[in-house]
Image: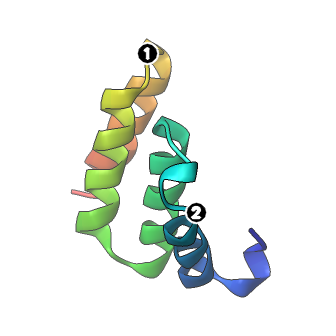
């Protein structure tokens, strides 16, 4: 993914990859890209999904804090 193409291009690439990409980090990337696009509700949901999927408590807390910051 190239940052210069923008958040929408990144989300499109994630969608194209489909089930080929899995895990909490993919959800966190999706959340970040959605935040860049201003879709706070979808970003919050993606951060919370990422938090549920990780086994790391510190990472879970971080992702939950990102979600909380979005309202």
Q: 39 or 27, which is in the foreground?
A: 27
Residue 17: assigned label: 2
Q: Where's the C terminus, which quadrant?
A: bottom left
Identified at 36% across, 46% down, the residue is: 47
The residue pinned by badge 1 equals 55
Q: CA distance from mark 2 to mark 1?
A: 24 Å
Position of residue 17 relative to residue 69, above or below, is below
Identified at 47% across, 18% down, the residue is: 58
Identified at 47% across, 37% down, the residue is: 24
Q: Quadrant of residue 65?
A: top left
Residue 10: assigned label: none
Position of residue 51 relative to residue 31, above or below, is above
Identified at 53% across, 48% down, the residue is: 26
Position of residue 22 relative to residue 42, above or below, is above
Q: What is the number of callouts on the image?
A: 2
**Label 2: how many residues lie within 10 Å, few (<14), some (14-19) or many (20+)?**
few
**x and y, in percent, of residue 21 in the image:** 56, 49
């Amino acid at each position: 993914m190239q940052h210069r193409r923008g958040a929408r291009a990144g989300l499109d690439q994630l969608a194209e990859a489909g089930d080929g990409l899995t895990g909490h980090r993919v959800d966190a990337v999706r959340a970040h890209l959605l935040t860049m696009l201003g879709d706070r509700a979808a970003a919050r949901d993606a951060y919370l999904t990422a938090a549920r999927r990780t086994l790391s408590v510190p990472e879970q807390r971080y992702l939950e804090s990102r979600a909380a910051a979005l309202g």
